[in-house]
Image (cartoon, grey):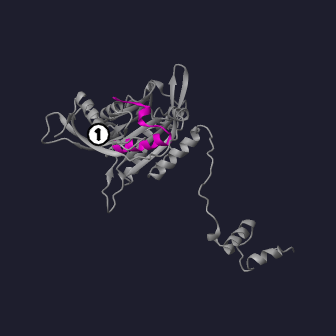
């Protein structure tokens, strides 16, 4: 039997009862301990290099999005690609003529390939709610299938669905219901993981009868994201008695945009930001997105962020009007802003809003 023995010089550095010293790094640590860590000079600079690995692939983007959503309380779902042809007759979201039908289906509930992830998501919601799990947040990556004049078409999609509370109740905070605005917040998280923003898309309202209301994120005439609150009529068909919000993403198109979007780095700001607020009286049909876009078009140099922090509809307002309270974050990356520059900027923004039909609320 061969026994490992420590070299003689090792016993001169550390005592034999220190059994955790087994390699060169451990010996170096013992030398530093004897010499004294305080005697080691600390360099004033830390040098490092950034390795460029090119644009992220779809698998890497998918992993990043999954990690973010899981950290925010979502569970990943995995559903069957087969579904019922009956679903495709309930809404105009899908077209029964484009169904990919099974030649020998196992049952009438699994006789076609799915054209959308919506019905799989609603089945999962229904199953959870019927088992008293009323707060559900799910995401799913899957494929959809259509029959076209050119043949069969497969598309990679991603679904995001929520019902009940988006944030559970706690002793210091009330519960927050899952609504359209919380859904948009989570969509922004997905876009951020893809190095994209809302500005990358043209956002428009749509009129699909699967939703009570719906918006679409379009890029070059392609609907990349559709999001909205599922219509009560469709929820009733699946025996769901509480509101559900849903978003479906064309994952192939989104990852292609992410790969084509170069990652940009910039220095952290040296000069302070300034916040100013405006309370605007607008028509009830006016959307916040219109005011946000107008603000960025009016002030492209100093405006860093626009936020809607209060909406009021009720007494003491003109008929057909509502009040938007907006905050504006201003910053000059070259110098500290003066009061005159801030006042001039806010004056231009207010003039642009008034030209669009808004008024400063007194």
Q: Position of residue 263 (x, y in %)?
A: 54, 38
What residue range appears in magenta?
180-206
Q: Name the residue nearer the viewer: 44 or 20.
A: 44
Residue farthest right in this picture? 1
Q: Name the residue nearer the viewer: 15 or 106.
A: 15
Q: Position of residue 249 (x, y in %)?
A: 46, 36
| Residue highlighted by disc 1 | 340
Whether residue 143 can be seen here: yes
The quarter of the rendered structure image containing the C terminus is top left
For image coordinates 27% across by 43% down, the residue present is 277
The quarter of the rendered structure image containing the N terminus is bottom right
Q: Secondary structure at mark 1?
A: helix
Q: Position of residue 56 (x, y in %)?
A: 58, 39
Q: Name the residue nearer the viewer: 184 or 291.
A: 291
Say whether residue 185 is magenta. yes
Whether residue 5 can be seen here: no
Residue 78, relative to residue 100: is it above or below? below
| Residue 192 placement, left or right of 91 | right
């Amino acid at each position: 039997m061969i026994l490992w023995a420590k070299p003689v010089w090792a016993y001169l550095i550390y005592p034999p009862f220190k059994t955790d010293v087994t390699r060169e790094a451990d010996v170096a640590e013992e030398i530093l301990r004897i010499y004294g860590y305080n005697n080691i000079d600390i360099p004033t600079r830390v040098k490092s290099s950034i390795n460029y690995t090119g644009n992220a692939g779809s698998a890497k983007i998918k992993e990043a999005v999954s990690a973010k959503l899981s950290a925010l309380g979502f569970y990943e779902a995995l559903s069957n690609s087969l579904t019922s042809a009956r679903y495709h007759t309930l809404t105009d979201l899908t077209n029964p003529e484009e169904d990919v039908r099974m030649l020998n289906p196992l049952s009438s509930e699994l006789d076609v390939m799915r054209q959308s992830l919506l019905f799989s998501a609603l089945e999962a919601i229904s199953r959870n709610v019927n088992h008293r799990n009323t707060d559900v947040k799910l995401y799913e990556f899957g494929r959809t299938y259509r029959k076209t004049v050119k043949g069969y078409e497969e598309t990679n999609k991603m679904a995001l669905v929520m019902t009940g509370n988006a944030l559970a109740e706690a002793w210091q905070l009330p519960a927050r219901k899952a609504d359209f605005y919380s859904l948009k917040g989570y969509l922004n998280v997905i876009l951020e993981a893809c190095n994209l923003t809302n500005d990358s898309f043209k956002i428009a309202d749509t009129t699909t009868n699967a939703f009570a209301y719906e918006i679409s994120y379009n890029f070059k005439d392609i609907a990349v994201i559709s999001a909205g609150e599922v219509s009560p009529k469709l929820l009733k068909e699946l025996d769901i008695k509480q509101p559900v919000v849903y978003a479906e993403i064309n994952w192939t198109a989104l990852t292609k945009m992410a790969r084509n979007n170069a990652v940009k780095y910039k220095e952290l700001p040296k000069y302070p930001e300034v916040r100013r607020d405006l309370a605007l009286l607008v028509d009830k049909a006016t959307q916040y997105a219109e005011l946000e876009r107008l603000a960025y078009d009016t002030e492209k140099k100093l405006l860093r962020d626009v936020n809607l922090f209060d909406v009021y509809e009720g007494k003491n307002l003109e008929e057909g009007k509502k009040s938007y309270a907006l905050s504006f974050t201003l910053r000059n990356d070259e110098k500290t802003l003066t009061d005159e520059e801030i006042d001039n900027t806010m004056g231009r923004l207010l003039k642009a809003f008034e030209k669009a039909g808004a008024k400063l609320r007194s």
